[in-house]
Amino acid sequence: MRVNEGLAALSQRRLLIVTGKGGTGKTTIAAALGLLSARQGIDTVVIELGETPLLPRLLSDDPATLQTDGGRDPIQLAPHLFTLRIVPEVALIEYLELQLRVRRIVNAVVRNKGFRRMLDAAPGWRALITLGKLWYLQSRMQGERPRWPLLIVDGPATGHGISFLSVPKVVLDSVQLGPLRRHTDWVQDLLQDPQRTLVLPVTLAEELPVSETLELCARMAGLGMTIGPVIANAVEPGPELPQLETVLSTLARLTPPARDAPLLDPELLRTCVEYRVRRSSLQRGFLKQLERGCGSSIVSLPYLVRAIENPASLAPLAKHLKRALAGWEMPA
């Protein structure tokens, strides 16, 4: 069987951060990547950071898994496939327990009003503790092997995602010594290591999503992070008609059908075909703009009519993603 080089290149990393403008399909792309990785026999954790758990219903039909919410450890949904929703407050308590080693002291610290006021005054702590949790998960071992070889994160939308991934640099610019500096160094090393971490932008072939994706690519380069494949979702192919101009001119000469005839109006049909031609041309232009601006080849996925809301409807997207990744290579 021929090896899917693109999928293999992604699966060899430890952390894939999927981000993109809201509404581009980044959550379903993260779920599809998790499904493909698990099918290769890689223990994969698909991680979400939002307040509402969305991934379990995309990845499992088991009603019991839909009740999982914000724990410390990944929950298994299927062979080699796990999910976790990181809640910063839960991750903070876990971090303090690892550092202080006495739960009674941790509880006293967390309940302290002064400590809570300090947290309220430091808005970046949620991002930092979340990134610290990701570092901790990828560092856990089972014998001589990583317990979780691959983490796939359904990251924040583009604007928040840039701020989220910028937090370690802000901390390192401000803190010179101590445990916070040391632990943030570890997180930053993980984020900036292209052998371990890639950012996967998800976009639509439309003006605003493309503009945000280009900004994301530039900002990630400034942070020393590496962009993986740029995934253009819901790309609509042009009409596959031989001698298209002849078809259009023929339609223009046809007379409208009788009122009750079960036929499409030729003018309406011609308008639909011309619209598809123009839209396909516009999307191709945006894809070329992305490829030039991000310096990475584009992985295009087709527009799917059926909504993706469970494992059965996720499967076609995963199939298209696998096929598209076969032609992607990591830039030298």
Image: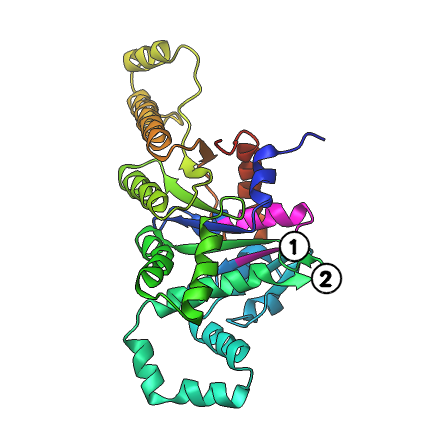
Tell me which label, 2 or 1, sits earlier in the chain.
1
Judging by the rendered image, the residue that carries numbered circle 2 is 143
| 266 relative position to 8: left or right | left
Residue on which the image places disc 1? 43
Residue span colored magenta? 30-46
Task: Give x and y (percent) for residue 31.
Answer: 53, 51
Q: Name the quadrant containing residue 268.
A: top left
Crowding near the residue tagged with mark 1, few <14, some 14–19, many ≥20 C-alpha atoms within 10 Å:
many
Q: Nearer the viewer, residue 24 or 262?
A: 24
Judging depth in this view, the residue of 64 and 123 nearest the camera is 123
- Tell me the quarter of the image containing the N terminus: top right
Q: Is residue 274 magenta?
A: no
Question: Looking at the image, how many numbered discs can be counted on the residues?
Answer: 2
Give the residue drawn at x 62%, y 34%: 4
Where is residue 323 drawn, in percent x and y? Answer: 57, 33
- Tell me the kind of residue under disc 1: Asp
Image spot of residue 203 (x, y percent): 37, 41
Foreground tag (2 vs 1):
2
Q: CA distance from mark 2 to mark 1?
A: 15 Å
In this rendering, the answer to whether 41 lies above or below 49 is above
Q: Dot 2: what SS?
A: loop
Residue 69: x, y in percent? 52, 71
Which residue is at 44% across, 90% downward?
108
Would residue 85 appear left or right of 269 to someone viewing this image?
right
The residue type indicated by label 2 comes to Gly
